[in-house]
Image (tube, helix red, strand yellow):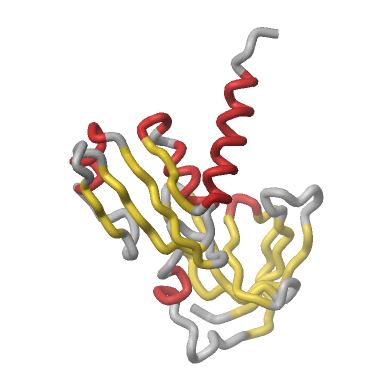
Amino acid sequence: HERRRVKVVYRGRNQPEPLQRDLDPYALIHRWGWWYVIGHCHLRKSIRTFVVDRMQKIRLTDDSFAIPPGFSLQSYLRHSFGMFTEELVRVKVRFHKSLTRYLLERRWHPSQKNKKLKDDSLELAFEVAGTKEIKTWIMGFGSLAKVLEPASLVKEIKDDLGKALKSYAKP
Protein backbone atom coordinates (compact mmCIF):
# COMPACT_ATOMS: atom_id res chain seq x y z
CA HIS A 1 0.00 0.00 0.00
CA GLU A 2 2.76 2.43 0.87
CA ARG A 3 4.80 1.67 -2.28
CA ARG A 4 8.01 1.27 -0.32
CA ARG A 5 11.07 -0.56 -1.61
CA VAL A 6 12.26 -3.65 0.23
CA LYS A 7 15.69 -5.19 0.56
CA VAL A 8 15.56 -8.96 0.33
CA VAL A 9 18.09 -11.73 0.57
CA TYR A 10 16.82 -14.18 -2.03
CA ARG A 11 18.02 -17.56 -3.16
CA GLY A 12 16.67 -18.53 -6.57
CA ARG A 13 15.90 -22.15 -7.35
CA ASN A 14 19.19 -22.71 -9.17
CA GLN A 15 21.34 -20.23 -7.26
CA PRO A 16 24.12 -21.73 -5.13
CA GLU A 17 24.15 -18.69 -2.83
CA PRO A 18 21.51 -16.11 -1.89
CA LEU A 19 21.82 -12.58 -3.29
CA GLN A 20 20.72 -9.29 -1.80
CA ARG A 21 18.28 -7.40 -4.01
CA ASP A 22 16.38 -4.15 -3.87
CA LEU A 23 12.83 -4.88 -4.91
CA ASP A 24 9.85 -2.65 -5.70
CA PRO A 25 6.94 -5.00 -4.94
CA TYR A 26 4.03 -4.43 -7.33
CA ALA A 27 1.83 -7.37 -6.33
CA LEU A 28 1.55 -10.28 -3.91
CA ILE A 29 -0.21 -13.31 -5.37
CA HIS A 30 -1.22 -16.68 -3.93
CA ARG A 31 -1.34 -19.49 -6.46
CA TRP A 32 -1.22 -23.29 -6.03
CA GLY A 33 -0.34 -23.04 -2.36
CA TRP A 34 2.58 -20.63 -2.86
CA TRP A 35 2.97 -16.90 -2.36
CA TYR A 36 4.69 -14.86 -5.08
CA VAL A 37 5.85 -11.27 -5.30
CA ILE A 38 5.98 -9.60 -8.69
CA GLY A 39 7.99 -6.42 -8.88
CA HIS A 40 10.95 -4.52 -10.24
CA CYS A 41 14.29 -6.09 -9.29
CA HIS A 42 17.02 -3.47 -9.22
CA LEU A 43 19.76 -6.13 -9.46
CA ARG A 44 18.39 -7.55 -12.74
CA LYS A 45 16.87 -4.21 -13.84
CA SER A 46 13.59 -5.88 -14.86
CA ILE A 47 10.22 -7.01 -13.58
CA ARG A 48 10.61 -10.43 -11.99
CA THR A 49 8.60 -13.02 -10.08
CA PHE A 50 9.85 -14.15 -6.67
CA VAL A 51 8.74 -17.05 -4.47
CA VAL A 52 8.21 -15.62 -0.98
CA ASP A 53 9.47 -18.82 0.70
CA ARG A 54 12.88 -18.26 -0.95
CA MET A 55 13.27 -14.86 0.69
CA GLN A 56 15.63 -15.37 3.61
CA LYS A 57 15.50 -11.78 4.89
CA ILE A 58 13.14 -8.91 4.13
CA ARG A 59 13.64 -5.34 5.26
CA LEU A 60 11.32 -2.45 4.48
CA THR A 61 13.19 0.70 3.44
CA ASP A 62 12.18 4.37 3.51
CA ASP A 63 12.59 4.60 -0.28
CA SER A 64 9.35 4.88 -2.20
CA PHE A 65 8.60 3.85 -5.78
CA ALA A 66 5.90 4.25 -8.38
CA ILE A 67 4.52 1.42 -10.47
CA PRO A 68 5.14 2.33 -14.13
CA PRO A 69 1.97 3.79 -15.68
CA GLY A 70 1.83 1.12 -18.40
CA PHE A 71 2.24 -1.86 -16.06
CA SER A 72 -0.71 -4.23 -15.79
CA LEU A 73 -0.48 -7.42 -13.73
CA GLN A 74 -3.05 -9.07 -15.98
CA SER A 75 -1.02 -8.21 -19.10
CA TYR A 76 2.23 -9.27 -17.45
CA LEU A 77 0.85 -12.75 -16.68
CA ARG A 78 -1.45 -13.17 -19.71
CA HIS A 79 0.74 -15.77 -21.48
CA SER A 80 2.02 -17.47 -18.34
CA PHE A 81 0.86 -21.02 -17.67
CA GLY A 82 1.30 -20.28 -13.99
CA MET A 83 3.37 -17.45 -12.61
CA PHE A 84 6.49 -17.18 -14.72
CA THR A 85 7.05 -15.36 -17.97
CA GLU A 86 9.57 -16.30 -20.61
CA GLU A 87 9.66 -16.29 -24.39
CA LEU A 88 6.33 -17.09 -26.06
CA VAL A 89 6.14 -20.64 -27.44
CA ARG A 90 3.45 -22.80 -29.07
CA VAL A 91 2.84 -26.11 -27.26
CA LYS A 92 0.69 -28.88 -28.69
CA VAL A 93 -0.20 -32.01 -26.68
CA ARG A 94 -2.27 -35.09 -27.47
CA PHE A 95 -4.13 -36.65 -24.53
CA HIS A 96 -5.58 -40.14 -24.26
CA LYS A 97 -9.34 -40.37 -24.79
CA SER A 98 -9.88 -41.27 -21.12
CA LEU A 99 -8.91 -37.66 -20.25
CA THR A 100 -10.98 -35.86 -22.89
CA ARG A 101 -14.02 -35.08 -20.76
CA TYR A 102 -11.89 -34.05 -17.77
CA LEU A 103 -9.69 -31.74 -19.84
CA LEU A 104 -12.68 -30.10 -21.50
CA GLU A 105 -14.32 -29.35 -18.14
CA ARG A 106 -12.14 -26.29 -17.66
CA ARG A 107 -10.06 -23.78 -19.51
CA TRP A 108 -6.42 -24.42 -18.60
CA HIS A 109 -5.08 -21.30 -20.33
CA PRO A 110 -6.66 -18.36 -22.20
CA SER A 111 -4.91 -19.34 -25.45
CA GLN A 112 -6.14 -22.95 -25.32
CA LYS A 113 -7.40 -24.47 -28.58
CA ASN A 114 -9.22 -27.82 -28.36
CA LYS A 115 -9.33 -30.40 -31.12
CA LYS A 116 -11.21 -33.64 -30.53
CA LEU A 117 -9.77 -36.40 -32.72
CA LYS A 118 -11.55 -39.29 -34.46
CA ASP A 119 -10.39 -41.80 -31.84
CA ASP A 120 -11.90 -39.55 -29.09
CA SER A 121 -8.49 -38.44 -27.90
CA LEU A 122 -7.92 -34.71 -27.49
CA GLU A 123 -5.31 -32.35 -28.85
CA LEU A 124 -4.72 -29.14 -26.93
CA ALA A 125 -2.64 -26.26 -28.27
CA PHE A 126 -1.38 -23.31 -26.24
CA GLU A 127 0.67 -20.14 -26.72
CA VAL A 128 2.50 -19.86 -23.41
CA ALA A 129 5.35 -17.87 -21.90
CA GLY A 130 7.99 -20.58 -21.55
CA THR A 131 7.66 -24.32 -21.08
CA LYS A 132 8.80 -24.91 -17.48
CA GLU A 133 5.36 -24.78 -15.87
CA ILE A 134 3.39 -26.42 -18.65
CA LYS A 135 5.99 -29.21 -18.81
CA THR A 136 5.32 -30.09 -15.17
CA TRP A 137 1.58 -30.04 -15.83
CA ILE A 138 1.92 -32.29 -18.88
CA MET A 139 4.20 -34.77 -17.12
CA GLY A 140 1.60 -35.08 -14.36
CA PHE A 141 -0.56 -36.98 -16.87
CA GLY A 142 2.18 -39.60 -17.38
CA SER A 143 1.74 -41.88 -20.37
CA LEU A 144 -1.69 -40.39 -21.11
CA ALA A 145 -0.10 -37.25 -22.61
CA LYS A 146 2.26 -36.85 -25.54
CA VAL A 147 3.86 -33.55 -26.53
CA LEU A 148 3.72 -32.98 -30.29
CA GLU A 149 5.47 -29.60 -30.39
CA PRO A 150 7.79 -27.84 -29.93
CA ALA A 151 10.55 -30.33 -30.69
CA SER A 152 12.67 -28.87 -27.87
CA LEU A 153 9.99 -29.76 -25.30
CA VAL A 154 9.58 -33.25 -26.80
CA LYS A 155 13.33 -33.78 -26.32
CA GLU A 156 13.29 -32.39 -22.76
CA ILE A 157 10.48 -34.73 -21.73
CA LYS A 158 12.11 -37.73 -23.41
CA ASP A 159 15.35 -36.96 -21.57
CA ASP A 160 13.53 -36.58 -18.24
CA LEU A 161 11.62 -39.83 -18.75
CA GLY A 162 14.86 -41.62 -19.63
CA LYS A 163 16.45 -40.39 -16.41
CA ALA A 164 13.39 -41.44 -14.43
CA LEU A 165 13.50 -44.92 -15.98
CA LYS A 166 17.19 -45.24 -15.09
CA SER A 167 16.44 -44.34 -11.48
CA TYR A 168 14.15 -47.40 -11.30
CA ALA A 169 16.74 -49.77 -12.78
CA LYS A 170 18.16 -52.42 -10.45
CA PRO A 171 21.62 -51.52 -9.10
Q: In this picture, is 79 found above or below 11?
A: below
Residue 7 against residue 164 in the figure, above or below: below
| Residue occupying the point 50% across, 53% down | 150
Residue at the outermost right position = 17
Residue that appears at 63% across and 85% down:
64
Judged left or right of residue 134, residue 117 is: left
Residue toward you, 104 or 14: 104
Q: Where is residue 132 in the image (x, y as percent from the top left)?
A: 54, 51
Q: Image quadrant of residue 101?
A: top left
State whether residue 5 is above or below residue 158: below
Answer above or below: position of 33 versus 71: above
Furthest residue toward front: 118
Q: Which of 115 and 132 is in front in this view?
A: 115
Residue shown at 35% from the left, 56% from the top: 125
Query: Exactly how many numbered labels are in the figure?
Result: 0
Q: What percent of the width, then of the height, locates residue 72? A: 44, 80
* Location of the C terminus (image quadrant): top right
Percent x, y for residue 32?
42, 48
Location of residue 77 (image quadrant): bottom left
Please tell me which residue is depicted at 36% across the width and 32% down the height of the picture: 144
In the rendered image, the residue lying farthest to the bottom is: 69
| Horizontal side, residue 94 vs residue 24: left or right | left
Report x, y in % for residue 63. Answer: 68, 83
Give residue 167's quadrant in the image: top right
